[in-house]
Image: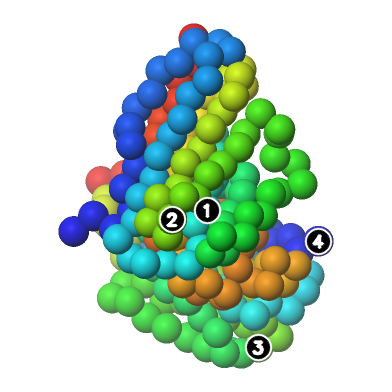
Amino acid sequence: GQQVMQIPQYQHVQEGEDFTTYCNSSTTLSNIQWYKQRPGGHPVFLIQLVKSGEVKKQKRLTFQFGEAKKNSSLHITATQTTDVGTYFCAAPRPGTGYSTLTFGKGTMLLVSP
Amino acid sequence: DAMVIQNPRYQVTQFGKPVTLSCSQTLNHNVMYWYQQKSSQAPKLLFHYYDKDFNNEADTPDNFQSRRPNTSFCFLDIRSPGLGDAAMYLCATSRGQGFEQYFGPGTRLTVT
């Protein structure tokens, strides 16, 4: 079945440093979605990437989808304490008509002031 | 404006005592999902409804059941909770195939 690998599992940075999390699949993905979950909170949808090589920006966050649609990354420039949380990538599962998601295990980001 | 609402937010039940968690949505989405999330793990899909069609994950224990009486509401029934069922239970909705999911705030279940 479809698997989505996400690294690193955990990262601790100083405020102002950059952060990147990577997501990889052995199969071609129809799209890739990114979610953020704050400590004690619930996952919140950030963005969806659909096209090969797509790059999207949301303020300090840059999302990329690989040319082969098998990998993706989320880069945060100059982290702030408000960026703390776990970032999950997720891809629609073809076996369910793309109506469910395969989640990566997530990258937990800690930002020290 | 709350879009996916879960009640209660915290639930304590005794070992073996049935419990029901509820979810409602104001988004009129076709698909509703129930996830189990344990500490430092990704959400684990238990089942989902596409309209009235129920879809069970292969590894969801028989102890877990669900009902969707109408578009807006979905329930998770745990027939005989064990200590291992203590977790956050997340409800989510989606417009359908390939679309993003909207999560509720979750119900934290404690089993004593």
Judged from the image, the secondary structure of the residue bearing numbered disc 2 is: loop
Q: Using the image as rendered, state which of residue B7 and residue A113 is in the foreground.
A: B7
Q: Amino acid at mark 2?
A: Asn
Res B48 → quadrant: bottom right
Mark pair 1, 4: CA separation:
20 Å
Mark pair 4, 2: CA separation:
31 Å
> Is the residue marked by circle 1 packed among few (<14), some (14-19), or many (20+) residues within 10 Å?
many
Judged from the image, the secondary structure of the residue bearing numbered disc 4 is: loop
Q: Is residue A63 visible?
A: yes
Q: B77 above or below A18?
A: above
Q: What residue is disc 2 on?
A: B70
Tags 1 and 3 touching, CB below 8 Å: no
Mark pair 3, 4: CA separation:
22 Å
Q: Amino acid at mark 1?
A: Tyr
Colour theme: rainbow
Chain identifier of the residue bearing label 3 in the image = A
Residue A1's disc number? 4
Task: Using the rendered image, report if marks 2 and 3 lie on a common chain.
Answer: no
Residue B33's disc number? 1
Q: Using the image as rendered, state which of residue B71 and residue B83 is in the foreground.
A: B71
Q: Residue at x 74, y 60 (%)?
A: A3
Q: Amino acid at mark 3?
A: Glu
